């Protein structure tokens, strides 16, 4: 089907549907007083932290220099897209398009999608198609959609974190693939497969990773228990790494945004959000409002408060309250988290923003490994998570 053969009425319906999804994702409670707090030791806060962070990033990197195809750029640019949907300022969208057009041609995308991480950036493809009507974005989205039926899975249907990591489910992985699949189903009338498969994958991972006594998730699961980190009869890893749990919460929220109200798995997804929210509340650091790198070990000297996960938890809580998944009492937990994250954002002497204490990319490991991960400034894990959180707190 050529780009011009899509009837205007159909294109308008699709654009309206996905435009509404983007606006819905950007909408949130009125920005609170915490949004105006300056960081400790910093200058007065900008009027709009999202604008300041994005402007700073665009000054630091042109689209051809910001980095290659990968999930961290997909995360960041999705956050920038939410800002664009709120403001309507085209230069921010043009920047996103310029990055994607490095990889997307009229033939789609050259990617074999051998791991879930490689799929995250495709989240924008249905949105780019809705915004521009350019067929190549749907062609690329179709390529990933066609990959799923043959993608390897555990015996109970969970997608391997990577084809080379046989039998492994990671908490990170559900965010990399499943929100795309759900959004694709909503955008292109493919909900029968996409809604069920995306929601099922969260359910399968949740069943293997959850720790009911704490309201937390373990980082990973290995079906046959052969990995050195797989422990006990459950074959899960031993520790509760903060960002894996944050990825999972955002994935549940994003799928709920598009899952039909009468879908049989919807209630289970809401229950997952409630499960996670209870853990978030229990382990929130009382002094700062943020959360620790290894969530339940806040008293250990080498542990540290991590910014990207704190942003993810705050978003999940605030959106959960807004949608009615969570009691209103959780808004106070979210607000403390939001104020705490803002204390990690500052404006440097060069006029550009800095977000600190962001964990670098992380595999499954032991406590010294998690504690020893580099604490980055302006890492895209943190920039993207911050924007998604901050847009939740804007009009």
Image (tube, helix red, strand yellow):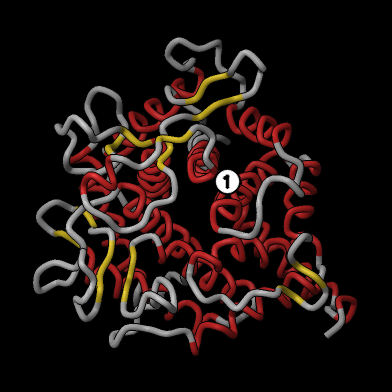
Q: Report the residue at 67% width, 66% height from top.
A: 125
| Above-or-below relation of 218 to 395 | below
Can residue 192 be seen from the camera position used here? no
> What residue sits right under mark 1 in the picture?
26
158, 85: nearer the viewer: 158
Q: Residue at x 70, y 31 (%)?
A: 55
Q: How many marks?
A: 1
Q: Does 294 sit above or below residue 109? A: above
Residue found at x 79% / y 78%: 107
Q: Residue 273 placed where, x, y %?
A: 31, 56
Q: Position of residue 233 (x, y in %)?
A: 9, 74
| Horizontal and vertical percent position of residue 40 | 42, 13
271 above or below 352? below
Dot 1 lies on which element?
Answer: helix
Q: Nearer the viewer, residue 267 or 225?
A: 225
Vertical order, 150 against 346 (above or below): below
If the image is split into quadrants, where does the C terminus sit? top right
Report the side of 355 relative to 90 (left or right). Answer: left
Quadrant location of residue 18?
Answer: bottom right
Placement of the N terminus among the 4 image quadrants: bottom right
Say left or right for 240 vs 81: left
Please, which residue is most extreme toward the right here? Answer: 4
Q: Residues within 10 Å of mark 1 (few under 14, many from 20)?
A: many
The residue positioned 50% from the left and 79% from the top of the image is: 194
């Amino acid at each position: 089907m050529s780009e011009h053969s899509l009837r205007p009425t159909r294109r308008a319906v699709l654009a309206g549907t996905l435009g509404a999804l983007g606006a819905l994702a950007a909408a949130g409670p009125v920005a609170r007083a915490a949004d105006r707090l300056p960081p400790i030791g910093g200058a007065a806060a900008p009027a709009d932290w999202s604008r300041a962070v994005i402007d700073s990033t665009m000054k630091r990197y042109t689209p051809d220099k910001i980095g290659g195809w990968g999930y961290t750029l997909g995360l960041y640019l999705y956050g920038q897209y939410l800002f664009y949907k709120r403001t309507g300022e085209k230069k921010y969208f043009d920047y996103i398009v310029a990055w994607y057009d490095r990889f997307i041609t009229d033939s789609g995308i050259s990617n074999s999608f051998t791991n879930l991480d490689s799929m995250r950036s495709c989240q924008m493809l249905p949105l780019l198609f809705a915004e521009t009507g350019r067929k190549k974005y749907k062609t690329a989205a179709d390529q990933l959609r066609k990959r799923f039926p043959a993608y390897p899975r555990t015996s109970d249907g969970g997608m391997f974190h990577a084809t080379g990591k046989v039998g492994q489910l990671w908490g990170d992985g559900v965010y990399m693939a499943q929100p795309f699949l759900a959004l694709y189903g909503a955008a292109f009338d493919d909900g029968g497969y996409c809604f069920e498969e995306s929601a099922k994958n969260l359910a399968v991972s949740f069943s293997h990773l959850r720790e009911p006594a704490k309201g937390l998730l373990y980082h990973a699961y290995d079906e046959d228990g052969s990995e050195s980190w797989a422990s006990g009869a459950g074959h899960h890893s031993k520790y509760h790494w903060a960002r894996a749990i944050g990825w999972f919460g955002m994935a549940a929220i994003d799928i709920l945004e598009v899952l039909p109200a009468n879908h049989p798995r919807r209630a289970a997804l809401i229950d997952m959000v409630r499960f996670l929210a209870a853990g978030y509340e229990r382990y929130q650091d009382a002094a700062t409002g943020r959360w620790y790198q290894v969530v339940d070990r806040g008293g250990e000297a080498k542990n540290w408060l991590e910014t990207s996960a704190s942003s993810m938890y705050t978003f999940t809580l605030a959106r959960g309250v807004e949608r009615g998944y969570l009691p209103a009492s959780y808004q106070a937990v979210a607000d403390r988290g939001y104020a705490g994250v803002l204390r990690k954002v500052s404006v440097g002497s060069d006029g550009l923003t800095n977000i600190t204490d962001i964990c670098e990319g992380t595999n499954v490991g032991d406590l010294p490994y998690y504690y020893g991960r580099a604490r980055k400034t302006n890492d895209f894990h943190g920039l993207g998570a911050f924007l998604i959180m901050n847009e939740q707190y804007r009009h």
